[in-house]
Image (spheres, rainbow, N blue to C red):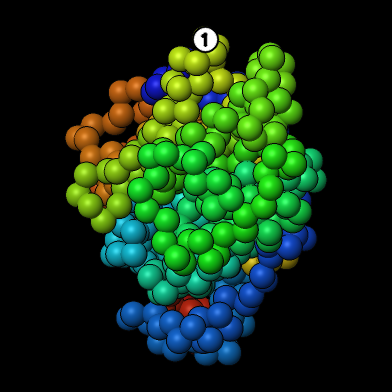
Amino acid sequence: MHPLSNAPSSRDRRGSRNSFGTSLPIPRSKRQSRLSSSVNIEDAMAAANITRPGMPPIQPTREIIASQLQDMSHVKTTAAKDMAFAFDIDGVLVHGDRLIPEGRRALEILNGDNELGIKIPHIFLTNGSGKIESQRCDQLSKILGVPISTEQFIQAHTPMSALSEYYETVLVVGGEKYKCREVAKLYGFKDIVVPNDIYAANPEISPLKEFFTEEQRATSAPRDFSKVKFDAILVFSDSRDYATDLQIMIDLLLSEDGVLGTKAKDPLANRIPVYFSQGDVLCPTEYPIPRMSQGTFRIALEAIYKSITGHELERVVYGKPELATYKYADEVMSSWMETIHNEEKLPKNIYMIGDNPQSDIVGGNMYGWNTCLVRTGVFQGEGNDKENPANFGVFNNVLEAVQTALKKELGEDFKLNWSDSMNPVTGNQSVSAVE
């Protein structure tokens, strides 16, 4: 297998698990792309019937009052706009479809339940995959009880949308049923093939496949694949059928110019490119012990390819901790700043909160972010991770991490809840207009 596949530390990875070391294409800002669905936060909360536990209903005057208070507390307001958070999701905010309770409160604070009533920029940076971004955001909004916009959301394959400008016919692997075909269509890919299309055309291609339901057959798109030239292989999400997917991918990697049923005289010279949306070996789920993720599938492909050819498989990996994902995160963060504060700029102090030292922490450290490791997911150790230590600290949960970061940037006296009684316009208590 590729020597970087099992390398756990940032020292070995040197910033990338990729084979090429080249700059990967990055899509346009989400604010300007086909993925964008700009929403007003309060409107979204009302539409979704989202309540804020312990807080009064949002009143039209609150935004005005908060704006006045922010003007009077200029130093804190400036600092609040110059910090931001990037959240991993699984193992930090949720376990599958189950809420991690501290996650909701952390997001309420950042969405304005603080002494300034100010929205503190934050995005969601996950190696999760397999759904259209808007569907995943809707799902998360319901679980977390706070609105999540596609403009602040990046999942593993989101940056791969840029590849649609380079490849015509692609094999898209992984995901539940045919959801990844829908994702690829949204991204602008023209000719999308999934493994079941190929199996439906010729079941002999995968002799180990035991089940092929009538629903799978009815929703497949078989054709004569001996006349189809594949330009690339895109692994969008976890494989649901290792045997079939690995067999078809190996066939294509060893083929002549990406045509199934052929065998290249020199597979190294004619090999079509293969991309993976992320490289995590383990992923937290509702099961008490983390489960295998897309990284194990990639390792299996690498091992098979090397045993046949004697050479390492050159491949490209997106997702955390790869550089392309973090550069795209900069674009999304700047765009989200414009959405909530009308200032398109990148905050100076960015905090990455994650549960996986080998992706969240490695990537954040290498990109110069402040990294926070939580014990609610993959990592559950007592101290810091030895191979990939979080540079800001280790916390029991996401709320502790957010509170500590806010106190550091905005002062120990910064109050983590909104109170009308502290308002200088309507409240009874006085607040200095000068800091």
Q: Which residue is mark 1?
A: 310
225 versus 1 height, above or below: below
- Residue lying at 55% horizontally and 34% vertically, measured from the top left: 249
Q: Would residue 216 be seen by someone viewing this image from the given angle?
A: yes
Amino acid at dot 1:
Gly
Vertical order, 298 against 143 (above or below): above
150 relative position to 54: left or right: right
Q: Is 279 drawn above or below residue 348 in the view shown?
A: above
Residue 163 quadrant: top right
Where disc 1 sits, the SS reads: loop
Residue 246, horizontal then vertical, whole percent? 48, 35
Question: In which quadrant of the rendered view does residue 235 lie?
Answer: top right
Residue that appears at 46% across and 67% down = 215
> Residue 218 or 150: which is nearer the viewer?
218
Q: Image quadrant of residue 414? A: bottom left
Residue 29 seen in the figure: no
Provide residue 189's location: percent of width, then percent of height.
73, 52
